[in-house]
Image: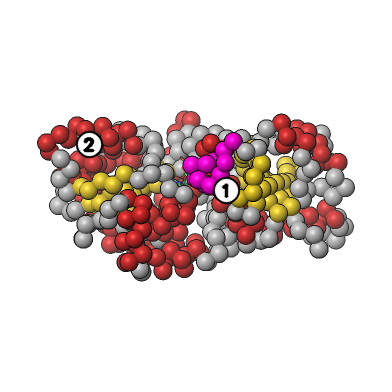
Amino acid sequence: MSVTRCDIFCKVIDNYGDIGVCWRLARQLAAEQGLAVRLWVDDLASFARLAPALDASAAQQRLADLDICRWDGAAASATPADIVIEAFACDPPAAYVEAMAKRPRKPAWINLEYLSAEGWVEGSHGLPSPHPRLPLVKHFFFPGFTPATGGLIREKGLIDRLRAFQADAASQAAFWQRIAGQAPAAGALSISLFAYENAALPGLLDAWASGERNIFCAVTSGRHLPQVDAWLASRGAAGCGKLQLAFLPFLDQGDYDHLLAACALNFVRGEDSFVRAQWAGRPFVWHIYRQEEDWHRVKLDAFLHRYGASSGTAGMRALKDFWQAWERESDAGGQWPALLAALPELAAHAASWQQKLAEDTDLASKLLIFCQNLLECAAFPKAATGASGN
Ligand code: TRH
């Protein structure tokens, strides 16, 4: 039987979330599902930051057992694959779509959507969207936190690998030396910081520097960095007090996963790092991607609710207050003592949340079942019973 071919189209809007998700999914579909994957990306320079082995000047290359192609004019004349995934409604080239329609057996065409914990996602997952002109149907595939959604990207064995790393002090010490050239001081609370610009950040750094607890903060490369630099410069003789800062280069995705697993608390943002923090099984703070008319607040509250933040425990109240302060860029420093005190409760919760999420089938497996159902429907339309394929 011939290998199923899959094309993934990715436009880098801004930041790293779009390519971060596509790169993970592409590798997983190739490595675990045996698909022949081609990943079309319009911005190879951004991509190369996540995948340092990538040659950003090459129109086409092979990496991690898949083909990576620059999304330029050549994409229009490519022969369509059996499965076509457009990430985040990025619209494959018109000529490519025409060629899809000409195939005797139409490809399974998926629009992979953004992640949300909102309730409507379950009802929209898998819905068809017929093409207005061509004999093609695109289907919406929504990631999510419940079995009735498309699930979350989770590579085979990920949780076991992260737990083994968390149980191995020597591997963690070697990891810190390799990525940061230093390790957290004994007894220090280790925190990773990845965020957007945030007016609340200097106040939080003040709270860390002047608090009782030693804090080791691994500052990742990102939009928050100039603020940390400015804060450091402003401290002068006061120094960093209880705060030990380690500035990291932009890590590859594997190392970033290990960073999240090594820390007791992670500040994450956007979509992909937000999911990876949940797989690390440690407490986290989410800097959600801002949307027009504050729509992101609905999304933030939906996740907080699903995460159990409405349960009313002291820990969950502290979490909710801190996340909301962080989103509103207001007085996160003032909220810090409560969050710090809540960490033991939040650590236990993060571990059971990780366990609960891991009971659902991962996104790549669900996606393949969904697409196989669509392809079977295309091959044997009368026998088809529908393509729910959660
Ligand atoms: O970069 P982001 O802010 O991406 C955002 C969101 O995805 C948002 O929903 C989307 O609309 C917008 O982009 C366009 O945050 P995110 O999603 O966490 O992506 C960051 C990626 O970078 C993720 O794959 C983790 C990875 N990463 C590394 O590989 N190494 C690093 O050192 C760091 C800090 C991140």
**Residue at 32 percent of width and 66 percent of height:** 170
Check the image and tell me how it is coloured: secondary structure
Element assignment for label 2? helix
Residue 303, percent from left and from top: 45, 50
Which residues, given as a range, are shown in magenta? 47-57
Q: Name the residue furthest left.
A: 237
- Name which residue type carries label 1: Trp
Q: Which residue is mark 2?
A: 232
Name which quarter of the figure residue 190 lies in: bottom left
Location of mark 1 (residue): 23
The residue that appears at 26% across and 32% down in the rendered structure is 230
Please report whichever mark, 1 or 2, sits nearer to the chain's N-terminal start.
1
Question: Helix or strand or loop: what does disc 1 sit on?
Answer: helix
Q: Is residue 207 magenta?
A: no
The numbered disc on residue 228 is: none
**Residue 221 seen from this side:** yes
- Kindly tell me whether mark 1's CB lies below 8 Å from ligand 1: yes
Q: Looking at the image, is 71 positioned above or below residue 356?
A: above
Q: Amino acid at mark 2?
A: Leu
Calculate the distance from the C-alpha at mark 1 to the C-alpha at mark 2: 34 Å
Spot occupied by residue 357 in the image (x, y as percentages of width and height): 49, 61
